[in-house]
Image: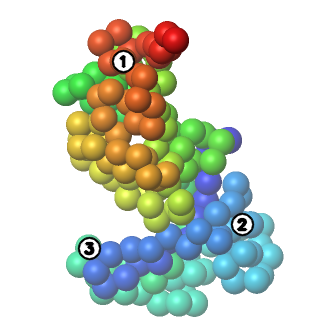
């Protein structure tokens, strides 16, 4: 699976993603939100939502109050520290941070779809979990020496073991 559908709620000063509507199919996402079955495509379903729930005058212009959007897994590269950030296509909530050598430094976890979208927007804008010391979602700060692993050695990006 390379992506999921979710209902996006457009608000006057932003947006919200309704996690409980996350689905592999646009029609199923529509059914979860409205309780009605449909075999229409995403464009038609969005027209139905706009007719039913109206529009919002937001800072981004006039938008439908609710719309079905597709979120797809991504891959980003940070030219400052050289890491790649690869989003899991299985659940979209896990972002693996990979060194130039292909070693996984760590993973960044996000709890819900709104956090996933915000993380993707930060990455699209050039953000980096390592350079900016993001929280990994489980209480560790991301850094060039890894996170949650005191024995991680960055110079050659290999785990080293302590000798007794």
Other-residue count near label 3 (Cα within 10 Å), few / some / many at <14 / 14–19 / ≥20: few
Is 27 placed above or below 105 here?
below
In percent of width and height, residue 159 lies at: 47, 16
Q: How is the image coloured?
A: rainbow
In percent of width and height, residue 37 lies at: 80, 76
Q: For the residues marked 1 and 2, what is the alpha-carbon distance in whole angstroms? A: 48 Å
Q: Which of 43 and 68 is in front in this view?
A: 68
Q: For the residues marked 1 and 3, what is the alpha-carbon distance in whole angstroms? A: 45 Å
Is 103 placed above or below 107 here?
above
Quadrant hosting residue 51:
bottom right
Determine the residue located farthest toward the right in the rendered image: 37
Secondary structure of the residue carrying tag 1 is strand
Q: Give the numbered dot on residue 27.
A: 2
Q: Give the numbered dot on residue 135.
A: none
Secondary structure of the residue carrying tag 3 is loop
C-beta proximity under 8 Å, tags 1 and 2: no
Determine the residue located farthest toward the front in the rendered image: 164
In percent of width and height, residue 124 lies at: 31, 45
Q: Which of 91 and 37 is in front in this view?
A: 91
Q: Which of marks 2 and 3 is nearer the N terminus?
A: 2
C-beta proximity under 8 Å, tags 2 and 3: no
Residue picked out by circle 1: 153
Q: For the residues marked 2 and 3, what is the alpha-carbon distance in whole angstroms? A: 26 Å
Q: From the image, state whether disc 1 or disc 2 is nearer to you.
A: 1
Q: Which of marks 1 and 3 is nearer the N terminus?
A: 3
Residue at (53% x, 60% y) in the render: 111
Residue picked out by circle 3: 60
Q: From the image, state whether disc 1 or disc 3 is nearer to you.
A: 1
Residue at (30% x, 35% y) in the render: 143
Residue 149 placement, left or right of 121: right
Q: Which of 19 and 145 is in front in this view?
A: 145
In percent of width and height, residue 79 lies at: 22, 25
């Amino acid at each position: 699976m390379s992506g999921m559908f979710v209902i996006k709620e457009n608000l006057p000063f932003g947006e919200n993603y309704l996690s409980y509507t996350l689905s592999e199919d646009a029609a199923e996402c529509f059914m979860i939100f409205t309780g009605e079955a449909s075999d229409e495509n995403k464009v038609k379903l969005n027209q139905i939502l706009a007719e039913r729930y109206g529009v919002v005058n937001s800072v981004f212009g006039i938008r439908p109050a609710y719309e079905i959007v597709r979120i797809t897994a991504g891959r980003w590269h940070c030219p400052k520290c050289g890491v790649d950030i690869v989003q899991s296509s299985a659940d979209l909530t896990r972002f693996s941070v990979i060194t130039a050598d292909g070693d996984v430094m760590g993973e960044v976890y996000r709890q819900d779809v709104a956090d996933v979208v915000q993380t993707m927007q930060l990455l699209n804008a050039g953000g980096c979990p390592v350079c900016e010391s993001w929280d990994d979602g489980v209480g560790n700060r991301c850094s060039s020496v890894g996170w949650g692993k005191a024995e991680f050695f960055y110079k050659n990006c290999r785990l080293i073991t302590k000798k007794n």
